[in-house]
Amino acid sequence: MSTIINVDYSTKIPNNVNLADDQRVLKGLEQWHPGYIDWWMTMGPAGFQTTEVYLRTAVSVDPKGWAKFDYIKMPDYRWGILLAHPEDGRKVGFGASKGETAWHEVPGEHRAALRRLIVIQGDTEPASVEQQRHLGATAPSLYDMRNLFQVNVEEGRHLWAMVYLLHKYFGKDGREEAEGLLQRRSGDADKPRMLGAFNEATPDWLSFFMFTFFTDRDGKMQLEALAQSGFDPLSRTCRFMLTEEAHHMFVGETGVSRIIERTCEAMKAAGIDDPYDIARVRSLGVIDLPTLQKKANLHYSLSLDLFGSEISTNAANFYTAGLKGRFQETKIDDDHLLTGAHYPVSKLINGDIKLVDEPALSAINMRLRDDFTKDCQGGVNRWNKVIERSGIKFELKLPHVAFHRLIGEFKDVEASPDGKLLSSDEWKNRGGEWLPSADDGAFIESLMKPCWDRGKFASWIAPPKVGIDNKGGDFEYVRINPA
Amino acid sequence: MNAPVTSAEFKKQHLIDPEICIRCNTCEATCPVGAVTHNDANYVVDAEKCNYCMDCIAPCPTGSIDNWRVVTTAYSIDDQFSWNELPTQEDLGEGASDAVQALEADIETLLATAHAGMGGKPVAPASASEPSVNLFRRDKPAIATVQGNFRITAEDTESDVRHVVLGFGDTIFPALEGQSIGIIPPGTRLDGRPHDVRLYSIASARDGEKRNANNVSLTIKRVPGGVGSSYMCDLKPGDKVQVTGPFGATFLMPNDPNAHIIMICTGTGSAPFRAFTERRRRAMPGAGGRMLLFFGARTPQELPYFGPLQKVPDSLLEKHLVFSRVAGERKEYVQDRMRTKIESMARVLGEPTTHIFICGLKGMETCVDEALADICRQTGREWAVLKPDMRASGRYHVETY
């Protein structure tokens, strides 16, 4: 049967959680709603709030119902509360409660921990919208502009998803936390967002693509881990969010890939084989490969910090409590308790970086981070294939986990991208080789000119291979000039 | 489940484009039968397991999932793991060409038979929308609710033709003008096997019989003793019907408002043309292209939609309703009327935007073909040259039964 689980549009908030019969939560969310719209209007995409954008809206969580495309003005987007279908007889899959029926209410003893997990996840969603709010003005094409806005409205929906959980399951505390999510601001000195990478600026489109590739991928891994949760509403929320998150991964990976493709193509056309002939490459109006490497170094290292400390008692407790699992927990063949198990962790031992076996429970963060790295590496390999096909000799590499870290084991040392420890003098002299400089930033900035003609793309980025919703090359993804 | 074959030799295989896929795992998480798997390099589809339910298509963020090859031997999982790019479609000859129509063997057979009168490979009009096919199958049908069942021929005639409206409620059922849907009559045959799926052309526009009502209409003639047609003609509002499809990827309405569309039909063959006309009326007011309808029946009383058709303005549709059994009048068939309208026909026939659609009983094919040949001859053209050219460019379509 393919009938769709009803999404209720009778309430102001589309939902498949029967809000109409839950007056307390409905009322709470309706009170939160104006604040959210206010936040969206002041902190959402600047300058495009009345523009019609060809967006995908989920109308159900069924495979066939959730990708409805149409033109819509972003403030009219139907932000709704959509949870994946409940799984019959779902059990807690790991930790001390493994095998128990999954919880449909918050277990009292885990209340504070769960709220914390949800608030941290929820805080990242509006943060990235804030970080990206000025990018529309310099979009390299209508296609890319549409993808940016799709990412933005879905981050908005992810905020809704977390706020629903706070309102539904955490009473007054939850409602206060939900308010707080609208009060903090990315990069604001007085009321910053909770995690470091979400207070960094996203000043240009290369940063945006790198951010969606690396930093949103941290979000994906966190959602994957929370989708395993024994708290069933959290699991179901995250499972549906992952489907949307995949679009963000797509925007990041193909964005960078299309930049690489364009750079290689321009180099070949100009007869340049040396990727380090940076001035000549830049004179072609494309971004040189070494600069892409520096940007990758920056965004990868910032994103690693989001996984927290390598050894974490909190993470171990979350796992044992059945609140947050591992990436693809159900596919891992072990006891899902990890009481006696070990996991290799990179650590600093007497001035050397070594792999040390640590209790697997306290190394949960580390394991998720390794899965993240592996996921990133797959994308980097595909970028390298684009370079390889062009015949240019250059390979993009993920830097060592000790490189440019602000959190965890390596925060007090300096290391090169290949993992060699450096003195602070060496770092001072050479750090600029590996991280984008002010000049690099100024060059990228100089390329950020809007390109808004249908079917046209800025000089530094190739067109995509396939359009969104199978649309042709000159499809008007954003109606800049309404008829 | 029917094997998705078009003949004993050909199989349509679902593949993922490794150059576009970002390995996000959405398809693997979505697939209800575990047909999608991956290694460190690629996400792939196991041809042995994939049942063409299409659940993975919409959630894929990249579009890489929507790739198909007609094969005689399926690519193995290991083949697919090793790919850096998709293989090109092997040239398997004419026989493989229909493979994209429906994916279900019995439906394929029905469509192949219906299109046989084209005398060559069917090609969709260049400006047609991309059709969805096979979203619902026999083992996973959509359930529609009957919203109306109206007789559209006079009560006192033998010919009982019905206009049946089916609503899909919350189920998404995207169907284009010219496509068909399958109906599964309830119960079993005498030998205990389930009834064959019956295929009916949709008579409503893509946005519904009633605009945005998520419903479709069908034009169905009661065949004495016919299981499918009797079932359909006897439906009451509120009855539930099992629906498969949509089907058909070539007999589709051109979206180009400048396309001239010549529609030739008998009886219930008028269904797709009702859809075409309604689409143009709703979506392309003031379209530059002309629409001509040659519609034959025995009498006005037996011509489906005779009344409503009178109200369609000539500016939208040039109507030629012809009758073969009106007492006291000379018998006239569609081909006869076409021959008398040489001027109208000649004006559009040579134009590169002209499309011809023929739908109805098999018996009309040859006569219509001869009439077109005559008209061409008299206006200095050669149908034997024009027809293959129109067919290859998606401008000549036949669906007869």
Image (spheres, rainbow, N blue to C red):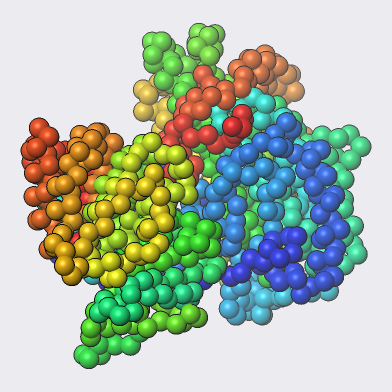
The number of numbered badges drawn on the structure is 0
At x 43%, y 15%, the residue is A267
Q: Is residue B216 above or below residue B349?
A: below
At x 81%, y 60%, the residue is A29
Task: Give the side of residue A201 with respect to residue B83, left or right.
Answer: right
Task: Give the side of residue A460 with respect to residue B376, left or right.
Answer: right
The image quadrant of residue A11 is bottom right
Residue A410 visible in rendering: no
Residue A238 visible in rendering: yes
The percent coordinates of residue A298 (x first, y second) are: 65, 30
Task: Give the side of residue B82 with respect to residue A355, left or right.
Answer: left
Q: In this view, does B309 lie above or below A472?
A: below
At x 14%, y 47%, the residue is B339
Give the quadrant of the C terminus of chain B: bottom left
User: A121 and B322: which one is in front?
Assistant: B322
At x 75%, y 60%, the residue is A12
Task: Give the side of residue A29 with respect to residue A447, left or right.
Answer: right
Give the quadrant of the N terminus of chain B: bottom left
The percent coordinates of residue A224 (x first, y second) are: 61, 57
